[in-house]
Amino acid sequence: MSGSFLDSNIVIYSLGDVEEKRLRSIELISENPIISVQVLNEKANILVRKFQMPIHDIQAIMKRIACECRVTILTEKTHFSALSIKERYQFSFYDSLIIASALEASCNILYSEDMQHGQIIENKLKIVSPFEVI
């Protein structure tokens, strides 16, 4: 098992105004990590709601992210795995969906600021806050 998976918040920071987080996020994206369609959806939603960007600009950003990262799809299996993870670990459903996607992609690291730094899921996936040392 190898590879890293980025949570939505890490990808969103790549456009943020906090320089340390923006630079670290860009660095992680440049390493060709895995993300799910959920990450693209959540980032697009933020760009529409909070940044009120024009759709053509959002599409360009989403295409760039999709080219720089390996994008996995969400399936029925992912959905039911997420429900099991939610029940076992008490994460929110959407965090559980991110975790399920990372596990399905055989990742050993999930970069997230929203989950417990250092937690191990299913003896396979370690949650790492990439900003822990900033």
Image (spheres, rainbow, N blue to C red):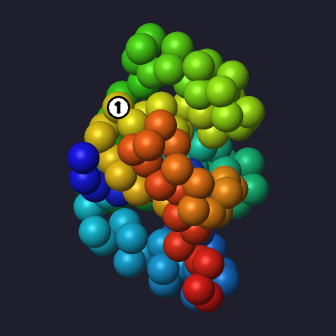
Please, which residue is most extreme toward the front here?
A: 123
Q: Nearer the viewer, residue 83 or 54?
A: 83
Q: Is residue 34 above or below residue 74?
A: below
| Image location (x, y in percent) of residue 73 | 36, 28
Relative to 132, is 39 on the left or the right?
left
Q: Is residue 24 above or below residue 32?
A: below
Residue that numbered label 1 is attached to: 104
| Image location (x, y in percent) of residue 119 | 59, 54
Q: Nearer the viewer, residue 24 or 44?
A: 24
Residue 11 seen in render: no
Residue at coordinates 52% horizontally, 50% vertically from top-left? 120
| Image location (x, y in percent) of residue 77 | 42, 14
Residue at coordinates 66% horizontally, 83% vertically from top-left? 18
Relative to 110, is 51 on the left or the right?
right
| Image location (x, y in percent) of residue 90 | 74, 33
Residue 1 seen in render: yes
Relative to 6, is 114 on the left or the right?
right
Q: Residues within 10 Å of mark 1 (few under 14, many from 20)?
A: some
Q: Secondary structure at mark 1?
A: helix
Residue at coordinates 65% horizontally, 27% vertically from top-left? 88
Name the residue type under label 1: Glu
Q: Which quadrant is the C terminus positioned in?
A: bottom right
Q: Nearer the viewer, residue 8 or 86?
A: 86
Residue at coordinates 59% horizontally, 19% vertically from top-left? 84
